[in-house]
Amino acid sequence: MNEPPPDRSGLSEVLKEISVHEHLCVIYETREQQFAVAVPFLRIGLARGEKCLYVADENTAASILDAMRGQGVDVDTPVEKGMLAVANKEREYLRKGHFDPDEMILYLAGNVREAKAAGFPAFRFAGEMTWALGGDLGADRLIEYEARLNRFLSEYDAVCLCQFNDKRFSATTILQVLRTHPLVVYGGHVCKNPYYVPPDEFLKPNQPEAEVKRWLNNIQKYEMVERALRTARDEWEQSFDAIPDYVCILDMSGAILRANRSMQERYEPTHGNLTGLDYRKVFGGSIQQGGTSSWEIIPSTEAPVSFETRLSTSDGWYAASGYPLFDDKHKRWGAIFIVRDITKGKRAEEALRLSEQHQRQITAQLETERARLVEAQDVAKVGSWEADLQSLNVIWSEQTHRIFETDPSRFHPTRSKFLEFVHPEDRAKVNAAFRDSLDKRSPCTVEYRIVTVAGQAKMIEERWRAFQDEQGRAVRVAGTCRDITERVRAQEELQRLSGRLLRLQDEERRKIARDLHDSTGQVLVVLAATLGQLRYFIPSSNRKARKLVSESQALADQCIREIRTLAYVLHPPMLDESGLEDAIRDYVEGFADRSGIKVKLDFSGDLGRLPRDMELSLFRVVQESLTNVQRHSGSRKARIRIERDPTRITLEVSDEGRKASGNRRNRSQELRSKTGVGIPSMDERVKQIGGRMEINSGSEGTTVRVTVPVNEESSKKTSDFGR
């Protein structure tokens, strides 16, 4: 064997975890390897106040003590006090002129009893086993002794280290040694021995058969563990690479040990292979090392670190987080660093701040409503209840009584009395939910209305679970109830304010469009005309001046076209003048010219004039949908279909975009994530006019479908609460 040099510092720490009742052996080739284990073994025992005995054979007592002194161990005092003794084989193993395992076990038991009687907490024994090679009578029973020693150590407060010279003992003997020692020290590591055979099995006559069965079981278990580890590793790697943020694992110096796929795709085109690079150089080349900033403390901090920053390699904002990594000894060995792009959120915040000067009144009102919502959440209380299905006993907490406005001293709840509080229209729903929950083992939730004794209406959210007996029959139900009346009212008010905000935004767009058309546009028209007249006053010989005037006139004409297009996109005047159908036709014609996308129009029936809010909302849906087709789908064709019947209007905008993978729900979510705030804005507009919007994305393209009621009753938005 070519044993690697021992790691003394690490080995000493591991040996500290060895306690009484342990039986370990060290397989060594050199004296350095032997003493790297034996000396710390004795030093730890002395530090714990244990009685220590060392039996020397290859080495003299003086060399043992000198080796201990060389590693800083005070041996003279323990020797004087009787804590440490170094003996030879004649005194310990061959006390009667031969070796007897049973006699040796009895002798060790006596040593333990004497040590305990003298006040020592335990007995620590280390022996050089080369004495067994001397041909003494009974030495052939060495392995039997080692097996019996395991029984002894399980019963006595002792720990034993057996030392075997690999160069002197045969391979056959070493194999037997491995079978009789549960712990093996080799290569500077203390290892749990998978080849160890318990003494009850080892000493039986049929030991080989039993060991074969155990080895086969171990092989099977090993394969199962290996398979589980491979599966866990594959799952971890897939999860690690699936994270959309930039994630890397660092060592204590900040060097990257591993980066996930998102980070590789973003930074390897610039830096090449990221492994081994300093993470600070990758994320921001101008960041200086050696400071105390959040960047610098990530590799060495013992606590998580989170901060927002701008990188010199990008003009965006990023949220960075660092988390320390520890080994199984809770020793810090590195960190995991996560960077998330929050640029969109930051830019949205900046845009909101810039617009506050134009919307102070709205913002103040929204803040007032937000404060009311926060206040409502602070005062919200949760009650609890329990019902025994066998005794029909029902218990309400005090808060539940407060919610239902009942007096706990007078009102004794039952199922029938509870149902009297429930709004008549909601009783069937509550009863059905309760019956269905009796066969479930997971929590159930239902929202319903109640009417108190005083006639006050409340909205209640109830969450409960049924508990079954061993036969699976429901025997008890327990749950909570919460008054969500204020929350429901707040949600309704928030939707009202959202609608108002959309209307104000539309009014602002209309004003800006009108100003652009009536003021800036007209000035540019006059400018273009003036430049055209000016050109004729310049002599034909002055070609340079005439060319500059012509180019200026062309720029003025381009500005006129762009101003008109912008004004139209902000608010098409034809929508007010001629209605939705003509406005869509006019917009589609301009869109096709600008984008090169062919749009097919399909109007079924005469739309006529619709309410102003409805026409504007449907036009914005068409406008945003065509923008998404141009930006995201890659389709060169689109179709708009509008159908009106006596009860509703159906609007569909579809394309023939790229094929998507996965199920329909995932494709729709993917589309929503790619199109930013446009789709939520469309959805909110449709809700404001009482409609519903759906998005379906498949292999043949994407379709946005909006359905809006047109009769007065279905168009009127009313709250379900308060009926």
Image: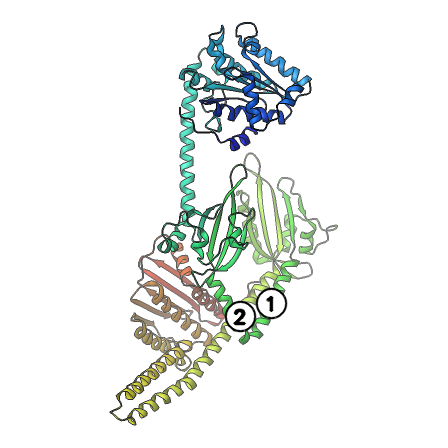
x, y percent for residue 549: 31, 87
**Which one is nearer the viewer's eye here, 247 or 112?**
112
Q: Which residue is mark 2?
A: 353
- Label 1–label 2 contact, CB within 8 A: no
- Residue 28 visible to the viewer: yes
On residue 720, which mark appears?
Answer: none
Residue 467 drawn above or below residue 492: above
* Residue at 61% over, 60% down: 485
- Residue 722 visible to the viewer: no
x, y percent for residue 637: 29, 67
| Local SS, label 2 | helix
Mark 2 crowdedness (10 Å alpha carbons): few <14, some 14-19, many ≥20 = few
Q: Amino acid at mark 1?
A: Glu
> In terms of image quadrants, where is residue 564?
bottom left
- Whichever of callouts 1 and 2 sits on the residue coming sooner in the sequence is 2
* Residue at 45% over, 79% down: 510
* Residue at 30% over, 91% down: 535
Taking the view exactly as shown, the residue that stands out farthest to the right is 409
Tell me: 150 left or right of 111.
left
Q: Quadrant of the N terminus?
A: top left
| Local SS, label 1 | helix
Q: Name the mark nearer the viewer: 1 or 2.
A: 2
x, y percent for residue 118: 69, 18
Q: Quadrant of the C terminus?
A: bottom right
Residue 126 drawn above or below residue 467: above
x, y percent for residue 361: 58, 75
Residue 20 drawn above or below residue 88: below
Which scheme is used to colour this image of the protein?
Answer: rainbow
Q: Which residue is mark 1?
A: 369
